[in-house]
Amino acid sequence: MTGTAERYPFVERDPSLGMASLAPILPLTLVGVQPVAVSGLLDTGATVNVLPYRIGEQLGAVWDQQKTPVTLSGNLASCEVRALLVSAVVGGFPAVRLAFAWAKTDAVSVLLGQVNFFMEFDVCFYRSRACFELRPKQTAASPAPGTMTQ
């Protein structure tokens, strides 16, 4: 299934703005003590994946047991943040481990950023068609799409 792409629609975030508010939001399941279905914004400008506090708690994570501090910038610069590794299932793909900056606030959405969501998945955005395609990263054994082999 590594070479197979799955297509997802952009999601309208503000009905009053219509098409102008469409965003690449991906449904996924995070696996902890119990699975938690979430929707994450694919953010190519975000350095790291970000997880709100309540989602981490629902997964069974204990704040005081997470010892690796993380520093964020922007809106979350003053927020306490810890690293949290979580298994995630996206569509029909095999589970992957995602590293999140677990923020001690719920004033943030689930963000899927460069480290490490975009290191695990290749994504093609088709904004004019209001959709995106997602596929797991290619391994050395499987050629990249469009590559010819001998």
Image: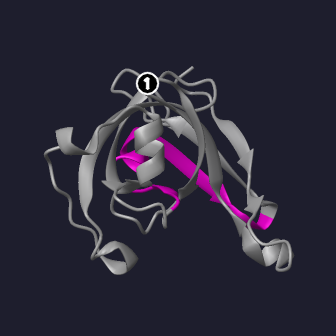
Q: Which of 141 and 42 is in front in this view?
A: 42
The residue sitting at 50% across, 21% down in the picture is 94
Q: Mark 1 points at which residue?
A: 142
How far across and down, in percent of the image, does residue 61 sit? 33, 36
Question: Is 120 on the left or on the right of 11, as rendered?
Answer: left
Q: The N terminus appears in which quarter of the rendering?
A: top right
- Relative vertical location of residue 75 with respect to residue 62 in this rendering, above or below: below
Q: Where, by quadrant of the figure, is residue 129 drawn?
A: bottom right
- Relative vertical location of residue 35 with respect to residue 144 in this rendering, above or below: above
Q: Nearer the viewer, residue 142 or 20?
A: 20
Q: Give the range drawn in magenta.
A: 109-128
Question: Is 19 on the left or on the right of 102, as rendered?
Answer: right
Whether residue 103 is visible to the viewer of this picture, yes or no, is: yes
127 in magenta: yes
Q: Where, by quadrant of the figure, is residue 57 drawn?
A: top left
Label 1 Cα crowd, 10 Å radius (few <14 / some 14-19 / many 20+): few
The residue sitting at 82% across, 80% down in the picture is 17
The residue sitting at 39% across, 78% down in the picture is 75
How far across and down, in percent of the image, does residue 19 sit? 83, 73
